[in-house]
Image: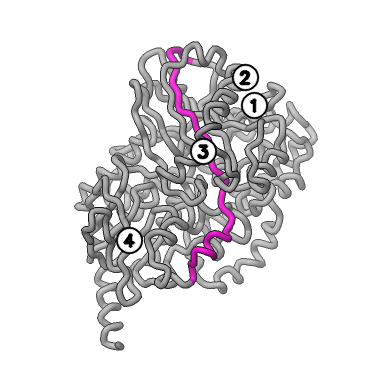
Amino acid sequence: MRAIVIGSGFGGLATALRLRVKGYEVLLLERRDKPGGRAYVFEQDGFTFDAGPTIITAPFLIEELFTMTGVKATDYAELFAVHPFYRIRFDDGETFDYSGDPAAMRAEIARFSAADVDGFDRFLRVSRAIFEKGFLELGHVPFLEPSSMIRIIPSLMRLQCYRSVLGLVKRYIRNEKLRQVFSFHPLLVGGDPRHAPAIYALICYLEREWGVHYARGGMAAVVSGLVRRLEEMGGTLRLGSTVEEIVVRDGRARGVRLEDGGVEEADLVVCNSDYAWTYMNLIRPEDRPSHSDRALRRRRYSMSLFLIYFGTNRTCPDLAHHTILLGPRYEGLLEDIFRKHRLADDFSLYLHAPTRSDSGLAPPGHECFYVLAPVPNLLSGTDWASTRARYRDAIYDHLERTCVPGLREHLVTERLFTPDDFRDTLLSHLGAAFSFEPTLAQSAYFRGHNKCPDIEDLYFVGAGTHPGAGLPGVLSSARVTDSLISAPAEATASSERDGDAA
């Protein structure tokens, strides 16, 4: 039996490997010139840039993709721990080194507010309980029926998941700066800390459990390792292949029609492309009554991102691998981004400096960077063609004042990526960087289903599906989707029984 996977992001690659292990013939279709999806990597002027995810938590989810195929992960990709996890810089210049070291964390907290050390310990205990329920128990199981959601409501109530992440943090932490330190994590998966349910507080303990990692050679090394293993096992990756339509016959997905008019037949189809975009553009309206365009447009979508990839001809040895630069406003900026959909004059930034840990990503004596600003999605109406240069300059000004002095003087290469590019290059609805916004009404059963409710043999994987965005979420979604797909022999027997019944 043959499976087609649309999109070679981490979700698509993970699912393709899992299906190959099950015994399916696998064709992985990618419209771009390289695999990786959001984890696309590009080279420019001797620099190697991760275009998307840069933080690896729950590294076992990557390692198991290799071990389940009978090989050692270390023969395909090298992951190493980063310390500190993040250096958080406040607008007044104070910094907080966020790590997995309990003693170091308590000491950092005490520098800001000794009274909050005990509150942090209590918050961490709550985060652990949420992690054990939300990630270890529920993160890898499907939510396809309302009853599956109803069953977990008592547990969610006991864990205070009716609160927001920020609301939960405020129960235990009093210092305003520390409240930002322990509530920013939903932004890593496209959520507003003021509205993301407290289930996402599990990220705090997830990092504590396994640490924050990076891959030697960048995310390209992990992607190429997964592709190499897939091809060794007989799977096929085809680049430059744009899918125009998912072919549906008699209520079942039976392949795809490509841009060149050709049709690839299959027994099942898995989509790693953007969830909303896929429904609205690749599936005929009459085949998807539960996912009309109107219903999809009424959903809440995550913020977008403005990114600058740049390289300098000098190094910055005082920088951490990951730096978060918080702006003068926290909740006010979140309101502008998520609810008002307004591009504000101020911003908060994430600065990635991978050459602090992996010098091979830049020429000798050089440094490569990636700076990211959360911005509203395209509901803002921002004309990015005329705004991008001004916004870039404002970010460069801020970086020069704070942690990369003399940036422009030493700048040797750059590339920009705006919400328009999320829409046009990544085919993301509204230019949303993380698909649906993670709210209580868009989590678990209420998130995109891993199995299409209208079309048999059509499955979804990736940020828009359960359990959600972020590398652990996307890799876990592949686990969930895999659990819904029978092995070829079982699927054949089921199909024959359906035919006999008909």
Give the residue at x 52% y 16%.
Answer: 407
Residue position for label 2: 402
- Assess whether mark 1 and mark 3 are in contact (beta carbons under 8 angstroms): no
Residue position for label 1: 89
Q: Earlier in the sequence, mark 2 or mark 1?
A: 1
When asked about the image quadrant of residue 445, the answer is bottom right
Q: Earlier in the sequence, mark 4 or mark 1?
A: 1
- Assess whether mark 3 and mark 4 are in contact (beta carbons under 8 angstroms): no
- Residue 235 placement (x, y as % from top left): 22, 52
Residue position for label 4: 245
Judge depth for marks 2 and 1 and give the one in front: 2
- Assess whether mark 1 and mark 4 are in contact (beta carbons under 8 angstroms): no
When asked about the image quadrant of residue 107, the answer is top right
Amino acid marked by disc 1: Arg
Question: Of 378 and 332, which appears nearest the observer?
Answer: 378
Say few, some or many: other residues with alpha carbon within 10 Å of mark 2 (under 14 / 14 to 19 / 20 or more): some
- Assess whether mark 4 and mark 2 are in contact (beta carbons under 8 angstroms): no
Distance between the alpha carbons at the discs numbered 2 and 4:
49 Å
Give the residue at x 40% y 43%.
Answer: 425
Q: Find numbered disc 4 in the image and state the secondary structure of the residue it sits on.
A: strand
Task: Specify the farthest residue to the bottom.
Answer: 501
Magenta stretch in the rendered image: 290-315
Distance between the alpha carbons at the discs numbered 4 and 1:
47 Å
